[in-house]
Amino acid sequence: MTSYKELGLVNTKDLFKKAISGGYALPAYNFNNMEQMQAIIQACVETKSPVILQVSAGARKYANQNILKNMARGAVEYAHELGYDIPIVLHLDHGDSFEICKDCIETGFSSVMIDGSHLPYDENVALTKKVCEHAHSQKDYVTVEGELGVLAGVEDDVSAEHSHYTQPSEVIDFVNKTKVDSLAISIGTSHGRAKFKPEQCTRDANGILIPPPLRFDILEEIEKQIPGFPIVLHGSSSVPIEYVHIIEKFGGKLSDSVGIPEEQLRKAAKSAVCKINIDSDGRLAMTAMIRKVFSEKPDEFDPRKYLGPARDELKKLYSHKNKNVLGSAGQA
Ligand code: G3H
Ligand code: 13P
Ligand code: ZN
């Protein structure tokens, strides 16, 4: 059993309190490999932003949970070496069972998500409560994120055909019964790079898809029910069209890509939304740069020569998010 404090990590409790009162959201960036971790830490140190490093089930399978834990320990030391100690959370993204959450807590995660959103309400309550009881009774309190409402979209291990918005009438009961530390809600975001079907969107003069707005009315209603309670938005990539164009220019095919506009995320970050999950945008940034190098330098075969530019672009993207979208820059 490793406590996250031994790794130099923190839980989300105080960070969320500060984010809500300060009107910004913490970045929650997924990572699976060293380059992603380095880019996240470089960007967050440069912008003096606290950060949540997220590990999905897919990441655990791909990279090994212990390696990721030690990369988080390395991230703490790396930030220090870069000259500024930022608060770093190691968070399990979309945990789907009590056992996975328990295992991650024993490994040294400081925060876990138990995603019972696909279960009938009472089962979601029971599972989330069980995880909270376990996480909160640790010597060092581990924070827990629950979810109400189902996001549409497709990821490797996270999929839901249809979204169901969070019902504001359920949130007080859920929070009181489970004792979760934060609540992920569904107000129109979804996972992946194609967040809406083209028929749900309009098009601008250049034929670019314009998505329907997020359901801020539902968010406001939720905030009325549980004032000041930490809210989380999943599926919050903006799917920058520049990356889609680079990927397509160099042979990729990403038709009908559409994300959540940055202005809407800025607006959400100013509310009780205090954690915003972003993964797909990082994938797009890396893929764009790797495709570009492969196409422009066909004789290149040193992985550092394409992973390096991908890492640099990723850092640029995350710095931009912290400064201009989430408002977390300068808050560490
Ligand atoms: O919420 C989903 C994240 O983007 C993680 O995706 O399961 O493919 O690692 P993944
Ligand atoms: P995106 O696919 O929009 O990046 O969402 C990531 C996410 O919600 C991780 O939990
Ligand atoms: Zn998610």
Image: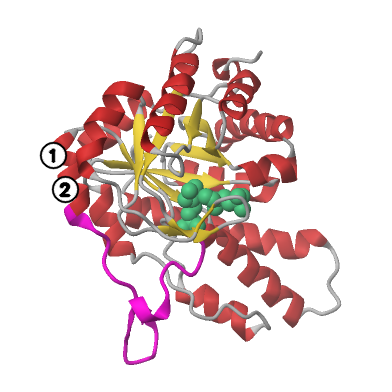
Compared with 301, 28 (above or below) is: above
Rendered image quadrant of residue 229: top left
Circle 2 SS class: helix
Residue that sits furthest to the left in the current view: 224
Q: Residue 85: x, y in percent? A: 49, 30
Label 2 Cα neighbours within 10 Å, binned few <14 / some 14-19 / many ≥20: some
Q: Residue 191: x, y in percent? A: 48, 58
Would the CB of label 2 be found within 8 Å of ligand 2? no
Q: Nearer the viewer, residue 54 or 99?
A: 99
From the viewer's perspective, is 150 left or right of 92?
left
Compared with 58, 205 (above or below) is: below
Residue that sits furthest to the bottom in the current view: 205
Give the residue at x 42% y 36%: 50
Give the residue at x 69% y 45%: 34
State whether the magenta stretch is mostly helix, strand or loop.
Answer: loop
From the viewer's perspective, is 296 left or right of 126?
right
The residue under label 2 is 220
Give the residue at x 69% y 29%: 70
Compared with 8, 26 (above or below) is: below
Q: Are marks 2 and 1 in contact (CB under 8 Å)?
A: yes
Q: Residue 164: x, y in percent? A: 35, 54
Report the magenta residues as a range: 192-217
What amino acid type should be assigned to the residue bearing mark 1? Lys
Q: Residue 331: x, y in percent? A: 33, 37
The residue under label 1 is 224
